[in-house]
Image (cartoon, grey):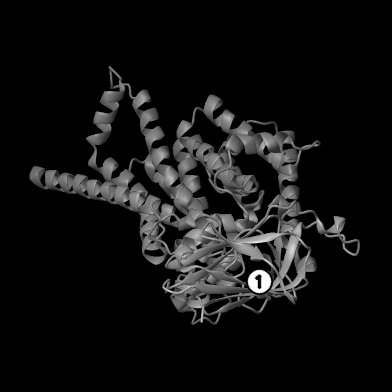
Amino acid sequence: MVLFYSPYTRTTSFTGFCQRVNVYDSTWFKMYINCILDKFLYVDLNNGQAVWGFFPLMPLIVSFFWYLTGFKADVYVVGFFINSLFFMVSEYFAYKYIMLTRKKLDVAVFYILFMTFGLYTFYFSLLYSESLFLCLLTMCFYYLKRKKYLTVGILGALLSLTRHTGVIFVFTILVSLIVDYKDDATVLRKNPFDFVLRAVKNPHLVLGTCLVPLGLFSYMLFLLNYVNDGLAFVTVVCTWGRNVDNYPFEQFFNEFCGEFPPSFLSVALVIVLFIICYGVFDGKRYEEMIGPVITIILCASTVLMSVPRAMIGCFTIVLTFTDMYCKLSKSSKVFIGVVVLLLEGVVFREWILLHPDLC
Amino acid sequence: MLDKKKIVSVLMYFVAAVLFCSYLIILVRSLDSSNASDEYRMFYKEHTLAFYLHDDGLKEEYCSGTEAVYLPDGKYRNLGEGWGPLGPNGIWTLDDNSTFYFYVDDTSANQVITINCIDNVGYNNRLYVNGNPVGDIIFQDGVASLEISNTFLVEGINVFLIHTDDDVLPICELRSETESQYAVNMLIYSIKLEAES
C-alpha cells in the first residue's frame, strides 16, 4: 500500500506516509495522547470540540508505547505498529472462533483475506480505535463460545472502554444464552422463569456480564468528576455537526429515497441489511447479528455515514458475508473478490485525497 | 473444597451487585447535569451560547465593568443566538432577536449599557434584560446608552435581548451594493456594561 500510493502522497518515507494517511479522527487521537501526557483535556476554542468525545483506552496504550520509545518515533508510526498488532491478534482469534463455530477452513481463510485486503481495512492500521475494538470483540466472541464468562467480562470491560458501543456485547451475551437454552435438549420444560433461574445460578456468568459495562461507566465517572457531566461524550457530539436525537428510520428512509441513482451509502446499507437478514434467517446466528443491528440504530441516530465503517469493524458482518461468499461458484468468488479489492483501492484513494464521503 | 467454592461464588455475586448498584448511581448522576458549569450547560446542552467559553468564563471576562469588543481578536464569547459571523469591523445582529450575556456580581446599583454601532439598517430596536423591557436603542453618533434598573438584574448571568418588531429583510433587498442574503439589523463594534456612577 505504501508503494502503491506513494504517487498520491508524494512521499517515499514511511513516516511521511503515516502522517499523510492519518487524518480526521486520527488527529484527535493524537491530541488525546498528548493530553494524557500533559494531563490536560483539550477543547477547541473555536467550536467546543473536545477530546473527551473519544474513549481513552487506545490513546492510553499508544501513549505508553510512545513513551517507551522516548518520544523519538512519530506517534502515527507507533500507532501504526500497535494497531497492526491488535489487528493480527483479532485475525488469530477470528480464525479460532470460525473453526469453533463453522469448522470450515475456507471461511477462516477468506475472512482473513477480506479483513486484510477488503473494504475500509486501511482503518485498522491508522490511529483509530477500530483495530483495538475488533481485537477485543473477536476475543469476546471466542471466549463466549467457550463459556469462559469471566474472561468475557474482563475483555468486555476493556471493549466498553475502547468505544461506548462495546457495552452492546451485554445483549450478545443475553441472546447467546437464549439460543443455548433453546437448543439445550436436557431441559424438558422451557420457560422464561427457568431460563432466568439457570442464568442467575451461574456466578461466573452473572459477574462476567456485570463486568462488561465497567469500562463505559468508569469513563462516565471520570467525566462526572472532570466536567460534571457523565454523558459528556454524547453531549459533545453536537459540535461535530451531529444530532444525537435523529430518528434512525427517518434517516434510513431519507437516504434510500433521497436521490436517484442511489448513493454509495444507500447501496452499502442495503448490502448490510441483506447480510443481517441472511445471518438471522438462513444462518440462524442471532447472537452474531444483535450487535450489528443495535450498532446501526445507534449510528443512524447520529450520522449514517459511519455505518459501513462500523459494520466492517464489528466482526460478524464480514464473517456472515464470508459464509455467503464461500457458497458461491468459483467464478462468482473471483468476480466479487476483484470488485472488493478495487473498491478498497478507490476508497483508500479517496481517503488519501481527503474526500471522506465514501469513508 | 465445597465451602471454598461457595465462598468464591458468594463473593462473585457480591461484586456483581456492587457493580450493578454503582452503574445505577453513575447513570442517575450523569442524567442530571445541573452541577456542570453555566457555560458548559449553555453551550453544549441548551445551545444558548454561540461560542465555547471555559468554566466561569462569563464571570471572569464578561463581568460588569468590562467591554466586549466584537472583533476576531477581541472579546466576543458572550453572544447567544441571533448573530452573524465575526467580521473585521464588528458583528451583525440577525433577524429580530439577538441575545448576549453579562455577569453582574453586585445588583445594589443601577447599570449603564453602552452599545457602539458601526452600521445600522434602520429598524426600531428595543433592549430587554432578563425579560424586562429597558428601553429603545437609539443611536447618536453610533453610540446608544441605556440605564438599567437594578431591579431588573440578577446576581450572576444576566440575559440581554435586542428585539425588533419590524420585519427584518435580507440586506440585498434594501441595499443594492450587496448580494448577501443575511437578514441583518445592526453592525455592533462593542458593548459595555458598567455600574452607574
Q: Does residue A351 lie above or below A183 as drawn?
A: below
Residue A96 appears left or right of A151: right
Q: Chain of mark 1?
A: A
Give the labeled residue for mark 1. A19
Mark 1 nearby-residue class (10 Å; few <14, some 14–19, many ≥20) = some
Quadrant assignment, res A297: top right
Q: Amino acid at mark 1?
A: Gln
Q: Does residue A152 lie above or below A2 as drawn?
A: above
Residue in the picture at 65% in, 69% down: A18
Residue A230 appears left or right of A70: left
Residue in the picture at 48% in, 71% down: B103
Quadrant assignment, res B164: bottom right
Query: Can you name the residue that lies furthest to the right here?
Result: B176
Q: Count the marks: how many?
A: 1
Q: Does residue A46 lie above or below A329 as drawn?
A: below
- Residue A41 visible in the snapshot: no
Image quadrant occupied by the N terminus of chain A: bottom right
